[in-house]
Image (cartoon, rainbow, N blue to C red):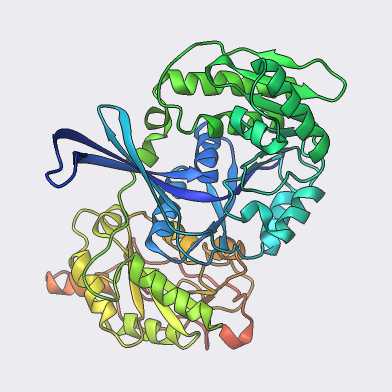
Amino acid sequence: MRGPLVVVGDTLLDRDVEGVVNRLCPDSPVPVLDETAYADRPGGAGLAAVFAAAGGAEVALVTALADDAGAARLSCLLAAAGVQVYGLPLAGTTPEKIRLRARGRVLLRHDRGGAAGEPGAPTEAVLRLLAGASAVLVSDYGRGVARQPALRAALAATRAPVVWDPHPRGPVAVPGAQLVTPNESEARELAKVPPGGPRLAVAAQAAQGLRERWRAGAVVVTLGGDGALLCAAGATPLMVSAPVSAEGDTCGAGDRFASAAGLALAGGALVSEAVQAAVGAASAYVAGGGVAAALPAPVRACPPVLIGGGERIGAAAAGAVVAEVRAAGGTVVATGGCFDLLHAGHVATLQAARQLGDCLVVCLNSDTSVTALKGPDRPVIPQGDRARLLAALGCVDAVVVFDETTPHAALGWLRPDIWVKGGDYATGVGDGPTLPEAELLRRWGGDSVVVPYLDGRSTTDMIAAARGERRTTAPADAPQPGPARSPMGPAHSTAGPARTTAEGAR
C-alpha cells in the first residue's frame, strides 16, 4: 500500500445494552430489561474503518462529527483502534443506534439523533489525503457525507480504486467506482427491480442495472450466508460461495465485507480476488461471533468519556460552548495538561490562551493519564478537584477530561482553531521543531502556537518543597527546551525566548 486506505462516510455511535428479562411491565404487556452491561463502538463508516485498521493497515476516516458528547465518545473509540480521524463539521447531534439484548437476541433497537445534519466542506488536508490514498471505501449510511459536493468531486478525481457501499437514502456512486457493494435488498431497491423470480437472476439483473446506470466497473451483491454475486461488463456473473456456513449476529457483516474488499484492492488485488477475500472475511466474522468478538481489544476496553463536576465540566459542556462560538463565527481555542497543584504559571498560560479567541476549552489529563505520564505518586490532586479549580477561573469556558496519555482524541473531536502550549516547550521563534499536535491540527485547518509564561513556577518543585526535598536537576517530566516556529506568524508567537521551568502547563 503506497498510502492509507481512506474510509469516507457517516459515523454513528452504536451501543449494545445487555440484560435479563424476568418480568413484564405492570402497566403494559412488554418485557422489562434489567441492564447488566453495555458496550459502545463506532458504527457505520467508523466500524468499517475499525475493521480495516484491526489488521495493522494504515487507515484514515473522513467523517462528520458533531459538537456533542456522542462525538467525543466516538473520537476516543476510533483513536483506540488506531484510526486517523479527519473530522468535518456536523450540524445537529451524533446519530446513535442502541440495541437492547437479552440472551444474545435483540429485543428492540432504539435510534436517536434526529434528522441528518449538514456536513461541512473538506479541508485541503482531506483533499490531499484522498489524492494520495491507496484505495478509498465510501461507507454511505444516508446521512449526507457521501453527498457533500466538494468531497464527491475529490472522490471522482482520485486515481485510487473506489469501493462504494451504498445506502438507499444516499446518493449514487461517483462515476468510475471500481466496485459497488449493495446487499440483496439494497440492490433491488436501488435498481428498482420488482421482487419475484429466481434469486440469482434477480440479483444479477439488479447488479447489471446499477452498474450501467452508475457507470461502475463492477457491482457485487452480497447474499448473506450464501456468499456474493459479482457482475462486471461483458462477463458472466461470478458466484462466490461462502467458505463456511454460520448463523449468528450479522450486524456489521456488510462493513466487514466492504473493508476487506477495500484492503484487497489497496494491495493490488483484482476485483474478483477482492470479492473472494471479502466473502471469506465476512463469513469468518459471522461464524466467529459477530461484532462483539471482532472488535479489537483496545476498543472493547476503551473507558467512557469522563464527565461530571459542574456546569462547565465534561464533553457535553465543552461541546455546547464550542457549538455556540462556531455558530457566531468565533474562534475556538484549546489547551491541555495535567494542572496538578494549580499555580500562577498555569494561570498566566490560560489567560494568554483565552485572549487568542472567543472561548477556551481545557483538555485535562485524568488521574489514570497523569499516573501513566508522571508515576504512581501523581497526581496529588484528583481529577474532579483539578477540573473544578480550572472551571472556576474566569478565563476558562469549559473543561473536558481525557483518559489517554495524549489529548489527540479530544482534539480530533473539538477541532479547535488554535491549540496553545505554554512553558518552555518552545519559544515560538527560530527553525526548531513544531509542536507535536501541529500535524493533527492541520487536518481541519487549525494552528498551534506557544505563549509566554511565568518563570520559576513548577508543580514538581512545589511538591518537592512540600515534602522537604531539594531539587538539584531538571525533573524528568519537564518539557524539553527548543525553538519552534509559530504557524500563526509573529502576531501569535511568544514575546521572547522562553526560560527553563520544570512543568510549564503541566
Horizontal arrangement in the rendering, residue 270 relative to residue 257 (left or right): right
Foreground of the two, 330 or 13:
13
Location of residue 430 by image quarter: bottom right
Q: Position of residue 481 (x, y in %)?
A: 47, 70
Foreground of the two, 173 or 72:
173
For the point 51% across and 35% down, the residue is 51
Foreground of the two, 8 or 455:
8
Horizontal arrangement in the rendering, residue 410 relative to residue 439 (left or right): left
Residue 82, can we see it? no
Numbered marks: total: 0
Q: Position of residue 423 (x, y in %)?
A: 41, 76
Does residue 92 sit above or below 179 in this rendering?
below
Does residue 165 sit above or below 342 in this rendering?
above
Which quadrant is the C terminus positioned in? bottom left
Residue 145, can we see it? yes
Does residue 246 sit above or below 294 in this rendering?
above
For the point 53% across and 23% down, the residue is 282
Q: Position of residue 330 (x, y in %)?
A: 53, 83
Q: Position of residue 461 (x, y in %)?
A: 24, 73
For the point 22% across and 65% down, the residue is 383
Location of residue 140 by image quarter: top right
Foreground of the two, 214 or 8:
214
Which quadrant is the N terminus positioned in? top right
